[in-house]
Image (tube, rainbow, N blue to C red):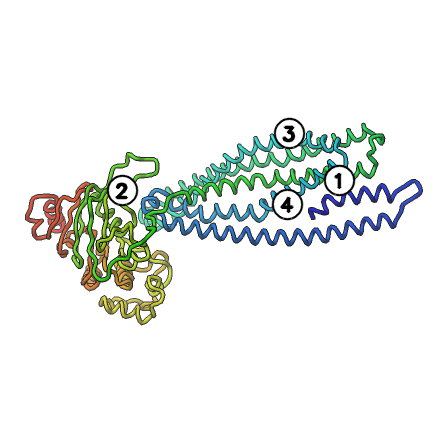
């Protein structure tokens, strides 16, 4: 089609100059030119279709690679970055921002490539036809570039703001849906709905403003097209036949002028889509520029076989946001050695840093200073794949994916058979609990495991951890917020799971600490006490005060 675009005016000129004369119409000549034009259009259409299909396939392959790379990058970000970035905004990067790029490549990108090529070809033919008229057309159309550039800068800022508003709406909607149960319990739905409505209103206004600016582009292209054609006709008439410009050449040149201006008009239509894609790409690149953490070592060291000890050597940590060095540290100079097979409880008031310490031992983040060693090897020298087969974390609120209990267990080790899953349940002595469920191991857990109780979700998490058969087990108070019967089951399962393993329990209740071999007490990020429960309750200090307060609260309850 692009070849036909500049060859058709030439054939029109030849048909007029050779096919029409005072003596009459040469039908054969006109028919020949028409046949040549038809062949050119058919060949060009086939070539364009082939090129578009090839470009479309390559662009989709590139977008597929971008989606995969973006998802993998987000998955490898540190916990600190996940705390800083809103989850809704990250979802928007993978979904809507990449989708704007897909829409651009489906039409806008091809328009820039094909129409840009057409403009160069047509401009060359125009200069060959009549360089004077060509310069007239170029000069009159040139100010359009300045107008488009000015509008483009405003449009770019407008679409940046619009994409930010869109990410904000997605964040609020995801929170509204995820927190539906809590909102219903407090009858706070209308309040949050108003916030979502306000965010949606701001989003609509930002897109309307961007659309209004973009709507100025197309009329501006049409106006300059009219001015350019009028100027070409006026100069051509003034020069007259004496310039050597025949009637056919003049008509052919007008066709070329229209063909030259058509891409400009189309550019005005795709420019706003281009700005949207640029804004989306800027946000995608912004996520990809966040350093992954913790990074993989260049030359990883294998963890030794058997039981593993854990050592903390003057560990500091701070959740510093990028560009903010004033964030107070969460941990300061924490040092301790946990022998292989020992069961340790980490306690402290809220904000003492105990959960953060568990994250560092599991290498969900790296210390800002100091070293964490497992089996005598610094975690910064251990590959993530090796660490995840030797150390497992059971969080306080385990995440379950929608599907059955079996599906939530098997993804930990996909090659295990259903019989292996059943054996793991028996090993933890949880068969009596499983038999109370309607479909046993095939019971559906619902979205985020909402069809199970909090304690039952923790039981699933313990079974899942046992499938890994870890040497080190990190528990973030896996017995909190459960009923008495489930707590007995959990305690019994934990006892069987922890047997022979190095176990570090982030204890929110002191009953957990009382059962441990050893207790580490944190206060404002510092390790202030270390010893068995029976000894610490006899000493004056943080632990004794916490224990007395816990006993008083339990007795009052």
What is the x, y in percent for residue 411?
Answer: 35, 62
Asked whether the residues under the numbered discs 2 and 1 touch, taking CB atoms below 8 Å apart as contact, a structural biologist would say no
Question: Which is more N-terminal, label 1 or label 3?
Answer: 3
What is the x, y in percent for residue 454?
Answer: 27, 57
Q: Which residue is mark 3?
A: 143
What is the x, y in percent for residue 197?
Answer: 43, 41
Q: Residues within 10 Å of mark 1 (few under 14, many from 20)?
A: many
Asked whether residue 480 is in view, the answer is no
Disc number lying in front (2 or 1): 2
Gap between marks 4 and 3, in whole Å?
23 Å
Q: Determine whether the residue tagged by mark 1 lies in a helix, strand or loop.
A: helix
Disc number lying in front (1 or 4): 4
Q: Residue placed farthest to the top in the image?
A: 238
Question: Which is more N-terminal, label 4 or label 2?
Answer: 4
- Camera-nearest residue between 554 and 527: 527
Q: Residues within 10 Å of mark 3 (few under 14, many from 20)?
A: few
Question: Which is more N-terminal, label 4 or label 1?
Answer: 4
Q: Is residue 211 left or right of residue 307?
A: right
Gap between marks 2 and 1, in whole Å?
68 Å
- The disc at residue 114 is 4
Q: Which residue is mark 2?
A: 368
- Camera-nearest residue between 404 and 53: 53
Q: Determine whether the residue tagged by mark 4 lies in a helix, strand or loop.
A: helix
From the viewer's perspective, is residue 421 above or below residue 284? below
Gap between marks 1 and 4, in whole Å?
19 Å
What is the x, y in percent for residue 441?
Answer: 32, 67
Q: Determine whether the residue tagged by mark 2 lies in a helix, strand or loop.
A: loop
Which residue lies at the image location 15% right of the left edge and 47% below the top edge? 521
- The disc at residue 255 is 1
Question: Which is more N-terminal, label 2 or label 3?
Answer: 3
Asked whether the residues under the numbered discs 4 and 3 touch, taking CB atoms below 8 Å apart as contact, a structural biologist would say no
């Amino acid at each position: 089609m692009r070849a036909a675009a500049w060859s058709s005016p030439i054939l029109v000129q030849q048909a007029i100059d050779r096919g029409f004369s005072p003596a009459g119409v040469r039908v054969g000549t006109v028919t020949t030119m028409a046949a040549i034009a038809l062949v050119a259009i058919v060949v060009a259409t086939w070539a364009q279709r082939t090129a578009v299909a090839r470009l479309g396939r390559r662009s989709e392959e590139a977008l597929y690679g971008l989606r995969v790379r973006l998802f993998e990058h987000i998955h490898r970000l540190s916990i600190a970055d996940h705390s800083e970035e809103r989850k809704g905004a990250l979802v928007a990067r993978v979904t809507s921002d990449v989708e704007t790029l897909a829409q651009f490549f489906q039409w806008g990108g091809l328009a820039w490539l094909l129409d840009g090529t057409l403009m160069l070809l047509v401009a060359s033919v125009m200069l060959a036809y009549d360089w004077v008229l060509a310069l007239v057309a170029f000069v009159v159309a040139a100010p359009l570039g300045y107008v488009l550039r000015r509008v483009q800068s405003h449009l770019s800022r407008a679409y940046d703001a619009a994409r930010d508003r869109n990410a904000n709406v997605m964040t609020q909607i995801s929170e509204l849906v995820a927190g539906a149960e809590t909102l219903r319990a407090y009858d706070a739905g209308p309040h949050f709905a108003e916030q979502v409505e306000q965010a949606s209103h701001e989003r609509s206004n930002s897109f309307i403003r961007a659309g209004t600016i973009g709507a100025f582009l197309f009329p501006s292209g049409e106006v300059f097209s009219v001015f350019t054609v009028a100027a070409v006709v006026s100069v051509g008439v003034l020069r007259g036949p004496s310039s050597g410009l025949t009637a056919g050449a003049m008509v052919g040149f007008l066709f070329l002028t229209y063909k030259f201006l058509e891409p400009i008009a189309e550019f005005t239509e795709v420019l706003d889509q281009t700005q949207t894609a640029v804004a989306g790409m800027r946000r995608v690149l912004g996520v990809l520029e966040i350093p992954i953490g913790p990074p993989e070592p260049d030359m990883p060291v294998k963890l030794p076989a058997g039981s593993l000890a854990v050592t903390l050597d003057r560990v500091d940590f701070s959740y510093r946001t990028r560009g903010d060095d004033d964030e107070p540290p969460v941990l300061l100079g924490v040092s301790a050695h946990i022998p292989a097979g020992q069961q340790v409880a980490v306690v402290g008031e809220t904000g003492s840093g105990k959960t953060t310490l568990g994250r560092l031992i599991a290498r969900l983040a790296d210390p800002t200073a100091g070293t964490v060693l497992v089996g005598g090897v610094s975690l910064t020298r251990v590959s993530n794949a090796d660490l995840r087969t030797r150390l497992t974390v059971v969080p306080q609120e385990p995440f379950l994916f929608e599907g059955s209990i079996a599906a939530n267990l098997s993804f930990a080790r996909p090659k295990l058979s259903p019989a292996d899953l059943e054996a793991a349940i028996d090993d933890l002595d949880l068969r009596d609990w499983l038999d109370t469920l309607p479909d046993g191991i095939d019971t559906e857990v619902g979205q985020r495991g909402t069809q199970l109780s909090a304690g039952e979700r923790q039981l699933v998490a313990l079974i899942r951890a046992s499938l890994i058969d870890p040497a080190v087990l990190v528990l973030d108070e896996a017995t909190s917020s459960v009923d008495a019967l489930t707590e007995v089951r959990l305690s019994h399962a934990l006892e069987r799971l922890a047997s022979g393993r190095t176990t570090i329990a982030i204890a929110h209740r002191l009953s957990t600490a009382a059962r441990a071999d050893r207790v580490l007490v944190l206060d404002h990020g510092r390790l202030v006490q270390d010893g068995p429960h029976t000894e610490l309750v006899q000493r004056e200090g943080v632990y004794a005060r916490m224990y007395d307060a816990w006993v008083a609260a339990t007795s009052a309850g």
